[in-house]
Image (tube, grey):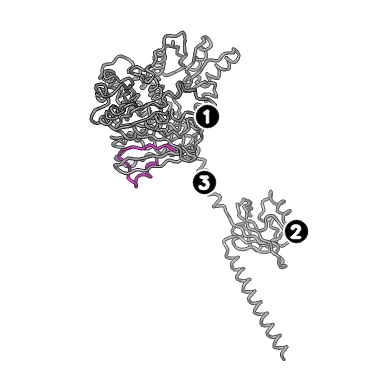
C-alpha cells in the first residue's frame, strides 16, 4: 500500500513538472512569435526548424515554406554561402564556432533577392532535441540609412567648409589687393611734405585702412581655425623680444589715452624658448589691445612668469571690468560681453575666440578674472619649452660691457607702483643698488641724504603729480645740496625733448623701454658716451645703389606703391605686369632680387618662380625671390617656399 502511495506521488510530481515545462515552452514560444526580431533555429544539417512571424516579414518567406529549407539557400547571400557552410560544418564537428555567443553585422538576402543589413546573435543548443543553433536577427536598415545620412552630411559639411575656406582665401585676395594700394599710397603721402590738416586726414585714412585689415585678418584666422587648417611652427626665439614687440605695436594707442603700458618679464623666465612665436605674439597683441581698448585711465601690465612646468602670461588692466554672468560669453564667436560694448568700442567679437583656439592648439589655457569697475586679468598659460644656454641652434651674441652696472646706485622716481616694481626688479638683476620713490619730494630728500654713497644716476618719470620729470630735473640741478648725478627721463608722449635737453637730462627714453635698450642706454650714460637723445630710432636713408630689382605685379596701383617704396629705399625698379613677363625679363637681366606677386594673369607667381629656378639651375646662380601675396590662409608660406621662393610678404606691404 505504501509503495502505491509513493508511486502516485511521483506520478503527480512528474505531471506537474511536465505541465510546468509545457507552460514554459508555450511562454517561450509566445515570446519568440511576438518578438519584433526574427527568430531562426537550425538542426545540425543547417536546415530551418523554427521561423517566427518577424522572420516571415523580414525575409519574405512564410513559415510553411521556410521550415525544412537550408538556411544558406534561404537568407544567406551567394557570396557568403561557402563561408556559412564551412562554419556550420566546423560547429557540428567541434561544437565550437567563432561566431557563437557574439553579435555581429552581416548582409542577408530577401526572397526577392535584395540584400538586407542585419545584426545577428547566434547561440548553440546543447540539448538533444533536433535544434543545433538559435539565432535572433534584427533588421538594421533604418539605422544604416541614418548612419549613411550622417556620413553624407559630414562629407557635405567638410566640403562646405573647404569651399568656404577657399572663398575666404579668394575674398582675402580681392580685399587685400586694393587695401594694399590704399595703405601704401597713404604711407607714401605721409612721407611727403603735408600741411597739418592734410597730414591729419591722411593719417586718419591710413588708420581706417589698418582697421579694415585687422578685421579681415580676424575673419581669415577664424575661418582657417574652424576649417582645421591651423598649423603651428616650432622655432627658437627670444621670449622677451617677442613680448616687447607685442607691446610696442599697441603702445601708441595706449599712450594716446594716457595709459601706462608696462611689460614685465620676471628674472626666472628663460631667455629663449621653443614654440610658435608668431601665434604667441598674436594672442598677446589681442589681449593687450583689448586691455587698452577697454581702459580709460590707469595701466595695462603684461607680466610673464614661470608657473611650474608652464609659462604664464598675465595681461591686467584697470578698465571697465566684466560682470561674472557675461564672462563665459567672451569666448563665443561674434559675441561681446554686452551689445552696448560693440556700439561703444567696436570690434567683431572674434579676437578672444581666436585666442582661446590658439591657446588650445598650443596645449594651453586662457582664463579671465574680472570685476566691474576694477579691471580684468587675462591669464594665458602654455607648456614651457626652455632652450638651455649653450644648446641653442642660434646662440645669443655675447653682450658688450657685461657687468658695467654692477654696484652702481640708481634712484627711480615714478608715481606708478607697478613701474617702480618692474624697474627695481630689472635693475636689481643687473647688480644695481636701487632706491625707488614715488615723487619729487621723496626724490630730493633721497638725493640730499645720499652722503658718502651718492647716486650715479636718477631715472625720472615725466608724468607725475606735483613736479613732473623735467621740473624735478631743474630742481635737482639748482639744489646746492645735491651733487653731480646723471639724469634720465622716461616719457610716453615724446614731446618734451627740448625741455629735457635744457634741464641737463642726458637720457631721453620713450616707453615702453626695451630691456636691452634700457641696459645699453644706462651703461653709455654712466660711461659718459651718451648724448641726448639716445633712443631715437633713425630710419637710415639708403644711398642710391647699383641694384635693380624686378617687381612682378598686375595691379597698377600696387605697381606704383611698390615702385615708390623701393625707390625710396635706394633701388632701381623694373615692373613686370604678369608671370610670363617676369620670366622673360629675369632671363634678360640679372636682377638683385625679384618681388613676385602670387596671383597674376597668364602665369601666376608660383609657376613663374618654378620656371626661373629651372633655368637658374643650369646657370649656377640663384636670384632672391620674395613672394607678395594677398592670400593669408595657412600653408601659403610653405607653398611659396616649395615653389622656390626665398621669403614671403603678406599684403598690404609695410614700408618698414
Q: Is residue 164 visible?
A: no
In terms of depth relative to the viewer, which is nearer, 40 or 64? 40
Spot the residue most to the left: 466
- Classed neighbour count for the residue bearing mark 3: other residues with Cα under 10 Å, few (<14), some (14–19), many (≥20): few
- Classed neighbour count for the residue bearing mark 1: other residues with Cα under 10 Å, few (<14), some (14–19), many (≥20): few
From the image, tell me which residue sits under label 1. Answer: 389
Vertical relation: 13 (above or below) 256: below
Nearest to the eye among marks 2 and 3: give it.
2
Q: Point out the stretch of residues depicted in magenta.
A: 312-332
Q: Earlier in the sequence, mark 3 or mark 1?
A: 3
From the image, tell me which residue sits under label 2. Answer: 94
Spot the residue most to the front: 452
In terms of depth relative to the viewer, which is nearer, 447 or 240? 447
Residue 594 is left or right of residue 259, and the answer is right
- Label 3: state its secondary structure: helix
Q: Quadrant location of residue 530?
A: top left
- Label 2: state its secondary structure: helix
Nearest to the eye among marks 2 and 1: give it.
1
Q: CA distance from mark 2 to mark 1?
A: 70 Å
From the image, tell me which residue sits under label 3. Answer: 150
Q: Which mark is residue 153?
A: none
- On the image, the x and y values in percent for residue 588 come to 52, 9
Q: Earlier in the sequence, mark 2 or mark 3?
A: 2
- On the image, the x and y values in percent for residue 481 come to 26, 24
Amino acid at each position: 500500500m505504501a509503495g502505491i502511495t509513493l508511486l502516485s506521488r511521483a506520478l503527480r510530481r512528474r505531471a506537474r513538472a511536465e505541465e510546468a515545462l509545457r507552460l514554459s515552452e508555450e511562454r517561450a514560444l509566445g515570446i519568440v512569435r511576438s518578438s519584433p526580431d526574427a527568430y531562426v533555429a537550425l538542426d545540425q544539417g543547417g536546415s530551418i526548424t523554427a521561423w517566427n512571424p518577424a522572420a516571415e516579414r523580414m525575409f519574405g518567406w512564410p513559415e510553411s515554406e521556410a521550415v525544412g529549407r537550408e538556411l544558406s539557400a534561404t537568407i544567406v547571400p551567394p557570396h557568403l554561402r561557402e563561408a556559412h557552410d564551412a562554419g556550420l560544418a566546423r560547429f557540428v564537428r567541434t561544437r565550437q564556432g567563432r561566431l557563437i555567443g557574439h553579435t555581429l553585422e552581416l548582409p542577408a538576402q530577401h526572397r526577392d533577392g535584395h540584400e538586407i543589413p542585419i545584426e545577428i546573435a547566434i547561440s548553440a543548443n546543447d540539448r538533444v532535441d533536433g535544434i543545433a543553433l538559435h539565432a535572433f536577427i534584427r533588421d538594421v536598415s533604418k539605422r544604416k540609412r541614418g548612419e549613411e545620412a550622417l556620413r553624407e552630411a559630414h562629407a557635405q559639411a567638410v566640403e562646405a567648409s573647404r569651399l568656404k575656406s577657399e572663398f575666404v582665401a579668394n575674398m582675402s585676395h580681392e580685399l587685400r589687393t586694393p587695401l594694399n594700394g590704399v595703405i601704401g599710397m597713404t604711407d607714401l603721402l605721409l612721407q611727403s611734405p603735408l600741411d597739418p590738416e592734410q597730414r591729419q586726414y591722411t593719417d586718419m585714412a591710413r588708420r581706417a585702412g589698418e582697421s579694415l585689415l585687422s578685421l579681415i585678418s580676424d575673419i581669415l584666422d577664424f575661418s582657417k581655425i574652424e576649417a582645421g587648417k591651423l598649423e603651428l611652427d616650432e622655432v627658437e626665439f627670444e621670449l622677451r623680444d617677442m613680448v616687447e614687440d607685442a607691446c610696442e605695436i599697441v603702445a601708441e594707442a595706449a599712450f594716446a589715452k594716457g595709459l601706462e603700458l608696462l611689460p614685465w618679464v620676471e628674472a626666472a623666465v628663460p631667455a629663449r624658448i621653443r614654440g610658435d612665436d608668431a601665434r604667441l605674439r598674436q594672442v598677446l597683441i589681442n589681449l593687450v589691445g583689448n586691455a587698452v581698448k577697454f581702459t580709460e585711465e590707469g595701466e595695462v601690465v603684461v607680466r610673464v612668469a614661470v608657473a611650474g612646468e608652464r609659462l604664464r602670461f598675465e595681461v591686467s588692466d584697470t578698465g571697465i571690468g566684466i560682470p561674472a554672468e557675461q564672462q563665459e560669453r567672451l569666448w563665443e564667436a561674434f559675441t561681446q560681453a554686452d551689445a552696448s560694448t560693440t556700439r561703444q568700442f567696436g570690434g567683431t567679437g572674434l579676437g578672444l575666440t581666436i585666442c582661446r583656439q590658439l591657446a588650445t592648439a598650443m596645449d594651453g589655457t586662457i582664463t579671465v578674472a574680472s570685476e566691474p569697475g576694477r579691471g580684468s586679468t587675462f591669464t594665458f598659460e602654455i607648456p614651457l619649452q626652455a632652450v638651455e644656454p649653450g644648446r641653442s641652434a642660434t646662440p645669443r651674441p655675447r653682450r658688450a660691457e657685461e657687468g658695467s652696472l654692477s654696484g652702481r646706485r640708481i634712484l627711480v622716481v615714478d608715481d606708478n607702483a607697478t613701474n617702480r616694481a618692474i624697474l627695481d626688479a630689472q635693475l636689481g638683476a643687473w647688480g644695481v643698488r636701487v632706491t625707488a620713490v614715488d615723487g619729487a619730494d621723496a626724490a630730493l630728500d633721497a638725493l640730499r641724504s645720499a652722503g658718502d654713497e651718492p647716486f650715479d644716476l636718477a631715472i625720472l618719470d615725466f608724468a607725475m603729480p606735483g613736479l613732473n620729470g623735467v621740473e624735478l630735473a631743474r630742481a635737482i640741478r639748482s639744489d646746492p645740496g645735491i651733487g653731480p648725478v646723471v639724469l634720465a627721463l622716461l616719457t610716453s608722449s615724446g614731446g618734451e625733448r627740448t625741455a629735457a635737453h635744457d634741464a641737463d637730462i642726458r637720457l631721453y627714453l620713450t616707453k615702453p623701454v626695451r630691456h636691452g635698450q634700457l641696459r645699453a642706454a644706462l651703461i653709455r650714460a654712466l660711461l659718459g658716451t651718451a648724448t641726448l637723445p639716445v633712443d631715437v630710432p633713425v630710419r637710415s636713408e639708403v644711398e642710391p645703389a647699383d641694384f635693380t630689382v624686378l617687381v612682378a605685379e598686375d595691379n597698377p596701383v600696387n605697381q606704383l606703391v611698390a615702385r615708390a617704396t623701393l625707390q625710396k629705399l635706394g633701388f632701381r625698379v623694373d615692373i613686370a605686369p604678369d608671370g610670363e613677363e617676369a620670366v622673360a625679363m629675369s632671363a634678360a637681366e640679372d636682377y638683385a632680387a625679384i618681388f613676385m606677386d602670387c596671383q597674376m594673369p597668364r602665369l601666376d607667381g608660383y609657376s613663374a618662380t618654378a620656371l626661373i629656378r629651372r633655368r637658374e639651375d643650369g646657370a649656377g646662380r640663384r636670384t632672391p625671390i620674395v613672394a607678395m601675396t594677398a592670400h593669408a590662409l595657412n600653408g601659403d608660406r610653405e607653398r611659396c617656399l616649395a615653389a622656390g621662393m626665398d621669403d614671403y610678404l603678406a599684403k598690404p606691404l609695410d614700408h618698414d
